[in-house]
Amino acid sequence: MSELDLTLQEGAALHDAGRLEQALALYDAALVRWPEQALLWNNRGNTLLEMAQFEDAAQSYRQALQLMPGLYDAQVALATCLQALGQIDEALATTGMVLEQYPDHAESHWNRALLLLLRGNYPEGWQEYEWRWKKRGFTSPLHRFSQPQWLGEAASDRTILIHAEQGFGDTIQFCRYLPLLCERGFNVLFACHPPLVRLMKTLDRRITVIPLGQPLPLFDCHLPLLSLPLLFATTLETIPAALPYLGPPADRLPFWKSVLPAGNRLRAGICWAGKTYPDPGRTVPASLLGTLADVTGIEFVSLQMGEQYEKLLLPLTDLTMLIRDFGDTAALIAQLDLVITIDTSVAHLAGALGKETWILLPFAPDWRWGLLREDCPWYPGMRLYRQEQRGTWGEVLERVVRALEERLQTPGGY
């Protein structure tokens, strides 16, 4: 193995171990020796992308592509950088360049799907979204059954299995389609993540809910959950958006009413931190939340799971240690007047419950929140507070403070 190969291997190992600064230093030193090596520039871009240094990452990918135009993965990663920088048209053009040369490049189709959906081009976006199953390292396994996949044909009193995929938020957002299958005459089985089972049983009594991984009853056809918008030909104008479509489990409400009895102050739930992967930008530093404490007359209640309380300067009522699953979270949210949250499963749950919800969005949002608009067609009445500049949460929280003050001054706003 050559010295260059060893360097590439060492850099990749450092990157995979999360030692990103060391990996970047290794690549920078190596490029002094081998400035014409496209793979070094590409790997350097990968590390910078992981560090959310999108401008520098884009420059590295461009240099790699100048040296090796057929390095399609670098082209895909460049499109990801451009999306993060808000350059949506350029990102789409970049994915298109790959697909012109390599029509079956699944990662480019996936990027293109997310970009089209972000722009609101749902008909084409849903078609491209089906490439997710061919994408390397997709977050959910492809379930294979002897029964056929549903392609939109009539129900004929058949039983259909819908299997959840991806994260909790995806399941909460898209389970709204299952009652539509019942209306078409299907007997619906829904296999979902175990922590969601109790909540999903509030969706529609005609639906049989099963934990993923458990033995399945007999069924005639099946479909992954997030393929339903395609088969229902969903556009921005035809999103099934009647709220609420989920509810708190009735047997959980008495307990949560007892531990959080009604008071005489506005009660706002708050969730501020999400998983760093795949989007490290979806976390508001806890130290900034003290801004909200300037608004008097509000009881803030934590909806933040996990240890995210370092440097928190906002007084909170924290009952999260009593939460067993999303049924409990729904019952807790039912005791609140308002939910303020980052883009995480809490946002989708509050929205599906029809609770007044304000979402704090990063500069480059997930596709489902669209571009520019301050509302959300998936959850009518929801308010979106977007970063005006990447990484600047302070001005977002200032807008939330003003909105809270206005909320308190309205009749019935406490």
Image (spheres, rainbow, N blue to C red):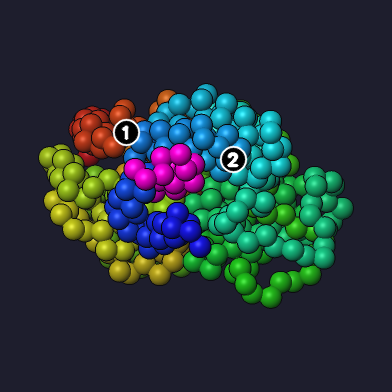
Asked if residue 346 can be seen in this view, the reply is no
Viewer-nearest residue: 109 or 30: 30
Indicate whether 83 appears above or below 274.
above
List x then y, in percent, for residue 146: 82, 65
List x then y, in percent, for residue 112: 60, 35
Q: Identify the residue shown where x is 49% and y is 66%.
A: 195
Circle 1: element type: loop
Quarter of the figure with residue 364: top left
Please indicate whether residue 356 sits to the left or right of residue 284 in the image. Answer: right
Q: Identify the residue shown where x is 57% and y is 40%.
A: 71
User: Which labelled disc corresponds to residue 390?
Assistant: 1
Disc nearer the start of the sequence (1/2): 2
- In the picture as drawn, the residue positioned furthest to the right comes out as 156
Viewer-nearest residue: 52 or 268: 52
List x then y, in percent, for residue 137: 57, 56
Viewer-nearest residue: 230 or 328: 230
Does the magenta portion include 175?
no
Principal secondary structure, stretch drawn in magenta? helix
The C terminus - image quarter: top left
User: Which labelled disc corresponds to residue 72?
Assistant: 2
| Distance from Cα at disc 1 to Cα at disc 2 | 27 Å
Which amino acid type is shown beneath numbered disc 2? Tyr
Which amino acid type is shown beneath numbered disc 1? Arg
Quarter of the figure with residue 76: top right
Please indicate whether residue 353 sits to the left or right of residue 104 in the image. Answer: left
Q: Identify the residue shown where x is 17% and y is 48%.
A: 287
Q: Residues within 10 Å of mark 2 (few under 14, many from 20)?
A: many
What is the span of residues highlighted in magenta in the rendered image? 32-50
Asked if residue 321 can be seen in this view, the reply is yes
Q: Identify the residue shown where x is 47% and y is 32%.
A: 62
Circle 2: element type: helix
Indicate whether 146 appears above or below 242.
below
